[in-house]
Image (spheres, helix red, strand yellow):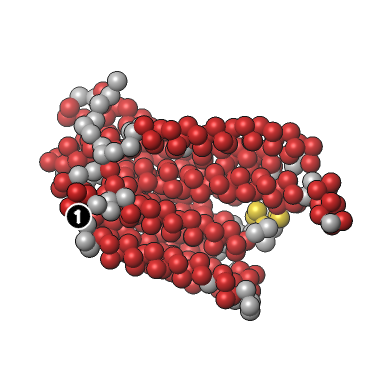
């Protein structure tokens, strides 16, 4: 009781709360903006595919801009609650962050201009949307690799960052394709089933590669994962993740079914896989916010600042969750013809 009272009075629990909120924001972003980035990556570019591109963009139309709120929230929490980590991370990732923002701007401009441009320019804006999605996902994957490698610039580290970039792109394509299985019908849904199977297998290869390389380059991660008896419990994470990939692949071979049964199951499984992968990453490095360099307590703002920020977070985060849930409820069901107002 005395130790708990000491922790409470010292405010040492506040950084844990804020790293939890930041983790929630990052995971929500990876899932929600992940699927709409994946849809952008998967846009077919044939002239005969225009109606499919319209339907795919209609499936993310009510959500894609709001999904990026979670990225803003995560970066805002990092800046305010962990300013030392924010400075260190941005110092190393300034250029890839700038490139990512260019990709996001390309997506935003293309989304609006494809509806306003002349008919013969519409395909060009669709290509811009696709390229912007690819640029965004590749840079996010590269940044994740740099973060895991402790911002090392050696050749092996850069090769790992390349693998991470391709793996994140495959993962976003996986969840984007699963979203299309849920939201589309007829030939486009059948096509999305094929995309989901292919992207899922590519994602599995990426996850296995990261799981093998990360413990080898980070001895602390290896010790954390393979110390007995903890190993008996934590290995459930990769085991469940692998079973999720296999179960999804088996299910996708039987889709689409009559009356569109189980069309939402692939997306739910991919969400579970994302959550497991994120949990594994968090377990690997907690309590470090910058692996091997800064812990959450070393990087945290003053206790008084965190207490003040927590009041706002208690109000803002539930509001974001509520309007997100409300928007998905309002726009549930299959995507219809695309309309701009």
Q: Position of residue 120 (x, y in %)?
A: 17, 29
Residue 155 visible (yes or no): no
Looking at the rendered structure, the number of numbered marks drawn on it comes to 1
Farthest residue toward the left? Answer: 48
Q: Residues within 10 Å of mark 1 (few under 14, many from 20)?
A: few
Compared to residue 327, the image places residue 159 above or below, namely: below
Residue identified by numbered label 1 = 257
Residue placed at 28% from the left, 43% from the top?
Answer: 183
Secondary structure under tag 1 reads loop
Q: Quadrant of residue 54?
A: top left
Please report the residue visible at 25 percent of the width from the left and 26 percent of the height from the top: 339
Q: Is residue 325 left or right of residue 111?
A: right
Residue furthest to the right: 2
Nearer to me, 20 or 43: 20
Q: Is residue 76 left or right of residue 38?
A: right
Residue 112 % position (x, y): 32, 27
């Amino acid at each position: 009781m005395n130790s708990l009272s000491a922790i409470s009075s010292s405010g040492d629990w506040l950084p844990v709360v804020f790293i939890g909120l930041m983790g929630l924001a990052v995971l929500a972003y990876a899932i929600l903006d992940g699927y709409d980035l994946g849809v952008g990556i998967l846009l077919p570019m044939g002239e005969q595919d225009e109606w499919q591109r319209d339907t795919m963009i209609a499936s993310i139309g009510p959500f894609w801009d709001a999904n990026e709120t979670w990225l803003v929230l995560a970066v805002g929490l990092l800046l305010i609650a962990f300013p030392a980590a924010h400075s260190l991370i941005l110092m190393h990732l300034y250029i890839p962050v700038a490139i990512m923002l260019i990709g996001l701007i390309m997506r935003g401009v293309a989304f609006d201009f494809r509806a306003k441009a002349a008919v013969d320019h519409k395909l060009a804006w669709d290509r811009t949307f696709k390229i912007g999605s690819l640029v965004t996902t590749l840079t996010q994957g590269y940044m994740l690799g740099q973060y895991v490698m402790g911002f090392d610039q050696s050749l092996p580290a850069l090769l790992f960052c390349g693998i991470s970039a391709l793996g994140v792109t495959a993962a976003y394509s996986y969840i984007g394709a699963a979203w299309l299985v849920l939201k589309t019908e007829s030939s486009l849904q059948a096509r999305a089933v094929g995309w989901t199977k292919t992207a899922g297998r590519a994602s599995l290869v990426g996850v296995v590669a990261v799981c093998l390389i990360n413990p080898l380059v980070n001895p602390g991660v290896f010790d954390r994962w393979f110390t007995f008896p903890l190993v008996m419990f934590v290995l459930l994470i990769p085991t469940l993740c692998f079973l999720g990939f296999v179960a999804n692949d088996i299910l996708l071979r039987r889709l689409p079914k009559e009356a569109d049964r189980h069309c939402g199951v692939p997306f739910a499984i991919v969400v579970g896989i994302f959550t497991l992968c994120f949990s594994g990453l968090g377990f690997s490095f907690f309590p470090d916010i910058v692996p091997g360099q800064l812990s959450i307590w070393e990087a945290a703002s003053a206790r008084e600042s965190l207490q003040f920020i927590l009041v706002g977070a208690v109000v803002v985060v539930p509001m974001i969750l509520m309007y997100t849930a409300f928007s998905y409820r309002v726009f549930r069901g299959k995507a219809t013809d695309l309309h701009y107002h």
